[in-house]
C-alpha cells in the first residue's frame, strides 16, 4: 500500500469517527429536547400532564370526534374540584394541601383505563378525558374517583362536572370545557361532594332556574 493510499484510509477512518461522534451528539441533544418538552407538559407536584398538555389533548379529541363522530363512541370530559381546598391550606398549611393534591392525582389515575387521560388543570382542579365513554359510563367513573379520593384522605371530598364532548359546537374545545365547568358549578351549588352532568344544568335552565 502506497503512502497516498494509507493517507486516504486514515482520512476515511477520521471521517467515520467524526460522523459517529456527530451522530452521538445529535442523539443526545434530541433526547435532551424530548425530556425538556416532557417537563414543560408535566405538573411537577402530581406528575400528571399539565394545563398545556390538556389543551392539546382536548383539541385532538375534538378533532377526532369531528372527523369520525358518526363512527366513534363518544368521549366524555370530567372537571374535578377538591371541596373546601382553601380551608385545608389555611388551616393545615400548604404541605398538607400538597398531600391532598397528590392523593387526588392518585385517585384519578387509579380509576382510569389505559386510554383515559388525567391532567392537573390549575390549583385544586383536574380534568379527565374518557374516550369511548358515554354519559352513564363517565358518571360511574366520576363516582368511583370521588369514593377512592375520600378513602385516601380521611373523608375529604370532591365535586365533579361531566359532559359528553360535542364536536359540532362553535369553538368546540372551549365550549365543551365550559359545559363541564357549568356542571361542576351545579354540583357545588347543590352541596358539593357529588357528580353533576351538563344535562342537569340544561334541564334546570329549561325549567327556568339556575
Image (tube, helix red, strand yellow):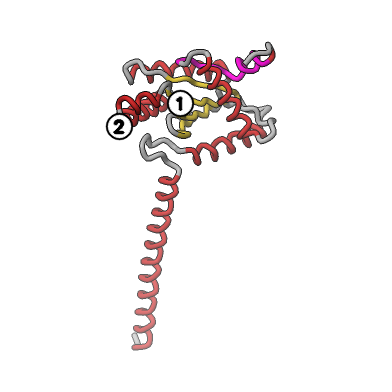
Q: Residue at x 61, y 29 (%)?
A: 176
Q: At numbered mark 1, what does the secondary structure look like: helix, strand or loop?
A: loop
| 197 drawn magenta | yes
In the rendered view, tell whether residue 170 sits above or below residue 88. Answer: below
Q: Residue at x 35, y 24 (%)?
A: 88
- Boundaries of the magenta span: 193-205
Q: Residue 196: where, in percent of width, then height?
A: 54, 17
Q: Earlier in the sequence, mark 2 or mark 1?
A: 2
Q: Label 2, on which residue?
A: 95
In the rendered view, tell whether residue 19 sits above or below residue 89. Answer: below
Structural distance between the alpha carbons of marks 2 and 1: 30 Å
Quarter placement of the C terminus: top right
Who is closer to the viewer here, 11 or 208? 208
Q: Residue 177: where, in percent of width, then height?
A: 58, 30
Main secondary-structure element of the magenta-colored stretch:
helix
Q: Residue at x 44, y 37 (%)?
A: 49
Quarter placement of the N terminus: bottom left
Residue 113's disc number: 1
Who is closer to the viewer here, 6 or 29? 29
Amino acid at each position: 500500500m502506497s503512502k497516498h493510499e494509507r493517507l486516504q484510509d486514515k482520512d476515511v477512518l477520521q471521517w467515520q469517527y467524526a460522523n459517529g461522534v456527530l451522530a452521538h451528539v445529535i442523539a443526545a441533544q434530541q433526547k435532551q429536547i424530548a425530556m425538556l418538552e416532557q417537563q414543560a407538559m408535566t405538573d411537577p407536584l402530581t406528575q400528571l400532564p399539565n394545563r398545556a398538555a390538556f389543551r392539546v389533548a382536548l383539541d385532538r379529541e375534538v378533532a377526532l370526534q369531528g372527523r369520525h363522530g358518526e363512527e366513534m363512541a363518544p368521549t366524555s370530559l370530567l372537571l374535578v374540584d377538591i371541596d373546601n381546598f382553601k380551608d385545608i391550606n389555611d388551616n393545615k398549611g400548604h404541605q398538607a394541601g400538597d398531600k391532598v393534591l397528590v392523593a387526588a392525582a392518585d385517585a384519578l389515575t387509579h380509576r382510569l383505563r389505559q386510554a383515559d387521560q388525567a391532567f392537573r388543570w390549575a390549583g385544586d382542579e383536574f380534568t379527565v378525558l374518557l374516550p369511548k365513554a358515554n354519559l352513564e359510563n363517565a358518571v360511574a367513573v366520576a363516582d368511583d374517583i370521588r369514593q377512592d379520593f375520600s378513602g385516601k384522605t380521611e373523608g375529604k371530598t370532591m365535586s365533579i362536572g361531566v359532559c359528553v364532548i360535542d364536536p359540532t359546537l362553535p369553538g368546540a374545545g372551549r365550549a365543551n370545557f365550559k359545559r363541564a365547568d357549568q356542571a361542576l358549578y351545579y354540583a357545588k351549588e347543590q352541596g358539593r361532594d357529588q357528580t353533576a352532568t351538563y344535562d342537569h344544568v340544561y334541564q334546570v335552565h329549561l325549567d327556568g332556574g339556575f
